Image (cartoon, rainbow, N blue to C red):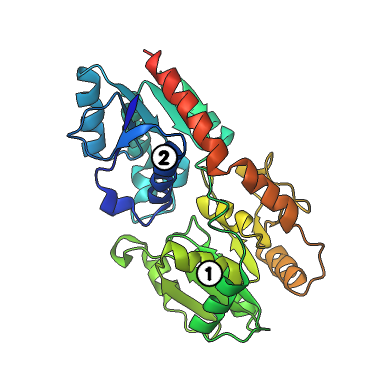
């Protein structure tokens, strides 16, 4: 078995969760000693596709004509496409038709969670769908005092300053508007949003919000994986305000770093993350503010050890074995 991890248009997704997922897949194959390549000119038995760009669709068709097996990793749904870019809600139904067409070119479909699997099962997809986490390298994101010091030094933060972070694109779906509002309401805490999106493709209300000038609100932009690890170790709370996800790799990273987490109470996390056991959840700005302050002022029981155990269940060493099992299933599909 030799796997082609197709990386067409990698420059468009390298700074996204899909880019991180592809890195995890490569590491999983290395861990399992499975022969693989990212060069489409090399011989291969299975092509693993993570994107729904036209060149990915073309490669899936070429591979099938050559008798190769096609594994599509379904990171995207119509539901998490909405409230993202300019016009995304308008074209969402067309996006659904497009990704359905792409996924039907695979022999099997993999998607990160049972929640996203259930969504895809309502589409007109005729291929077997399996759920498998994107995975997380828990050893890389392990909490570190040295990493904490690097983060605090870089951003000139006193050791006793309370820091709230979030990670993601500048999207309404990601909850960035609420993040900014909470920074306004809580000036005694520092708020950092890591990530970047071309402002030419985001709605005007997001562009206006990003111009909010507050001494405790910071948008450092995209940072390296190593710097992000420092941020998890150096901050006091991971605030995940997303309205819709297929999993949330950054959430896995925060769990692995044993960082306290406050997230929006949405369906995907109902049967996975329990409020008051693994993380804390909220639904309104008022409850987010209340719980955020309670967590930072240590008025809530710590939950990080139980959260870390969930991250361990999705460690790359475990996910890699399951991924290879699904590759084997693809060989007998169609």
> Real-space Cα distance between discs 2 and 1?
25 Å
Q: Residue at x 34, y 54 (%)?
A: 14
Bin the neighbour count of mark 2 within 10 Å (Cα to Cα): few under 14, some 14-19, many 20 and up: few
Q: Residue at x 42, y 60 (%)?
A: 169
Residue 274, position as x, y percentages in the image: 74, 47
Is any atom of residue 127 visible in this view? no
Image vertical order of residue 175 relative to residue 124, above or below: below
Side (left or right) of 251 relative to 31: right
Is any atom of residue 313 visible in this view? yes
Q: Which label belongs to residue 47?
A: none
Outermost left residue: 41
User: Which secondary structure, mark 1?
Assistant: helix
**Residue placed under numbered mark 1 in the picture:** 230
Q: Nearer the viewer, residue 156 or 56?
A: 156
User: Which secondary structure, mark 2?
Assistant: helix
Q: Residue at x 65, y 84 (%)?
A: 159
Bin the neighbour count of mark 1 within 10 Å (Cα to Cα): few under 14, some 14-19, many 20 and up: many
**Residue placed under numbered mark 2 in the picture:** 30
Side (left or right) of 158 relative to 174: right
Image vertical order of residue 276 relative to residue 217, above or below: above
Side (left or right) of 224 relative to 181: left
Indicate which disc, 2 or 1, sits on the residue closer to the N terminus. Answer: 2
Residue 65, position as x, y percentages in the image: 20, 18
């Amino acid at each position: 078995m030799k796997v082609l991890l197709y990386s067409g248009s990698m420059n468009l997704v390298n700074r996204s969760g899909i880019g991180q997922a592809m890195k995890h897949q490569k590491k999983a194959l290395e861990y399992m000693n499975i022969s693989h390549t990212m060069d489409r000119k090399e011989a291969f038995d299975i092509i693993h596709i993570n994107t729904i760009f036209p060149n990915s669709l073309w490669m899936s068709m070429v591979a099938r004509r050559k008798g190769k097996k096609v594994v599509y990793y379904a990171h995207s749904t119509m539901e998490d496409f909405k409230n993202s870019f300019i016009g995304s809600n308008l074209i969402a139904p067309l996006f659904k038709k497009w990704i359905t067409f792409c996924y039907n070119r695979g022999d099997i479909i993999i998607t990160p969670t049972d929640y996203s699997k259930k969504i895809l099962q309502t589409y007109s997809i005729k291929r077997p769908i399996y759920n498998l986490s994107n995975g997380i390298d828990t050893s890389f994101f392990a909490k570190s005092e040295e990493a904490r010091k690097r983060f605090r030094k870089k951003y000139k933060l006193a050791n006793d300053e309370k820091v709230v972070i979030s990670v993601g694109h500048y999207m309404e779906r990601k909850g960035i508007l609420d993040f900014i509002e909470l920074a306004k309401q809580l000036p005694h805490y520092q708020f950092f949003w890591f990530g970047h999106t071309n402002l030419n493709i985001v709605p005007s209300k997001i562009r206006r919000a990003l111009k909010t000038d507050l001494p405790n609100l910071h948008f450092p932009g995209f940072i390296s994986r190593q710097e992000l690890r420092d941020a998890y170790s150096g901050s006091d709370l991971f605030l995940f305000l997303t309205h819709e996800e297929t999993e949330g790799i950054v959430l896995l990273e925060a769990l692995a770093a044993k960082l306290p987490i406050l997230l929006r109470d949405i369906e995907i996390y109902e049967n996975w993350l329990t409020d008051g056991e693994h993380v804390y959840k909220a639904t309104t700005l008022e409850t987010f503010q209340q719980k955020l302050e309670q967590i930072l002022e240590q008025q809530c029981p710590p939950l990080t050890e139980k959260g870390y155990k969930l991250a361990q269940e999705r460690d790359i060493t475990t996910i890699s074995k399951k991924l290879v099992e699904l590759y084997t299933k693809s060989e007998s599909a169609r």
